[in-house]
Image (tube, rainbow, N blue to C red):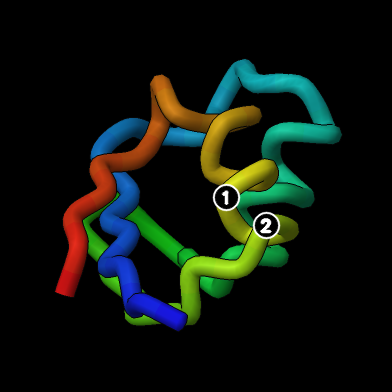
Amino acid sequence: MAKIKITQIKSVIDRSERQKKTIEALGLKKINHSVEVEATPAIIGMVRKVNHLVAVETV
């Protein structure tokens, strides 16, 4: 599988609890924090749900 780098670019303040939990499940903690993860279908689905809060690039 390919790896992707996910960076949180916006705050989760005033977001739904579901979006906050999704950001947390991706391993992101604060703005400009990045994680590298495998591009599994589950991860891609989570990224799509919070795509307005994160930036994604392939590694």
Q: Is residue 47 left or right of residue 17?
A: left
Q: How many labels sit on residues? A: 2
Residue 37's quadrant in the figure?
bottom left
Q: Is residue 57 left or right of residue 17?
A: left
Kind of residue at badge 2: Pro
Residue 1 position, x and y percent, is: 46, 82
Residue 29 position, x and y percent, is: 47, 66
Mark 1 lies on residue: 44
CB under 8 Å between callouts 1 and 2? yes
The residue drawn where x is 48% and y is 79% is: 38
Residues 24 and 45: in front is 45
Kind of residue at badge 1: Ile
The residue drawn where x is 27% and y is 48% is: 56
Quadrant for the C terminus in the image: bottom left
Q: Residues within 10 Å of mark 2 (few under 14, many from 20)?
A: few
Label disc, if present, on residue 36 of the rendered structure: none
Mark 2 lies on residue: 41
The residue drawn where x is 70% and y is 34% is: 19
